[in-house]
Amino acid sequence: MNCVAPRTTGFAAQGGHAEYIAITAGGTVLLPDDLAFEDAAPMMCVGYTTWSALRDADPRPGERIAVVGIGGLGHVAPQLAKASGFETIAVTHSPDKHDQAAEAYDRLSSGKMRFRGVFLPHGA
């Protein structure tokens, strides 16, 4: 996608949320036949956004990753970091989100990684 004057759909050009859109093949991915579009959509948005940040940070195997805020993006970022083999710390002000993050980690447990959640009360 080496366009001289690229236009981002949804920002510089209308579209992107329609049933059909004309884009370059390089800006697409093929989904497996057994993966529904509605199941893949969250990873194409929040997953790609958080993966891009992780990729740009360029951590090395075994390094520590901290995710501040367990919300829209922050509930996926720790899962991706842990699945990538990083020691992962989730930081939140909300007790209910601390539990949510811990449950997500339990689902990804490999036995060799550990979840460390940090709860910071408001004003801390």
Image (spheres, helix red, strand yellow):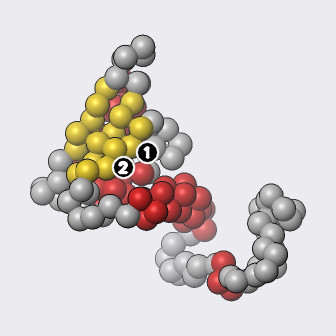
Q: Position of residue 52 (x, y in %)?
A: 50, 62
- Binning the other alpha carbons within 10 Å of mark 2 as few (below 14), some (14 to 19) or many (20 upward) gives many
Marks 2 and 1 sit apart, C-alpha to C-alpha, by 6 Å
Q: State whether residue 30 is above or below residue 95.
A: below
Quarter the C terminus occupies: top left
Tally of numbered discs: 2
Quarter the N terminus occupies: bottom right
Residue 2 versus residue 11: which sits nearer the camera? 2
Seen at 38% across and 64% down, the residue is 58
- Binning the other alpha carbons within 10 Å of mark 1 as few (below 14), some (14 to 19) or many (20 upward) gives many
Q: Position of residue 55 (x, y in %)?
A: 43, 64
Amino acid under label 1?
His
Q: For the residue labelled by badge 1, is the local secondary structure a helix, a strand or a loop? A: loop
Question: Is residue 50 visible from the viewing direction of this image?
Answer: yes
Drawn side of residue 104 relative to residue 6, left or right = left
Question: Is residue 108 visible from the viewing direction of this image?
Answer: no
Q: Are the residues tagged 2 and 1 within 8 Å (C-beta)?
A: yes
Q: For the residue labelled by badge 2, is the local secondary structure a helix, a strand or a loop? A: helix
Seen at 31% across and 26% down, the residue is 119
Residue holding disc 1: 75
Q: Position of residue 95 (x, y in %)?
A: 36, 24
Residue 78: mark: 2
Drawn side of residue 2 relative to residue 51, left or right = right
Amino acid under label 2?
Pro
Name which quarter of the figure residue 108 lies in: bottom left
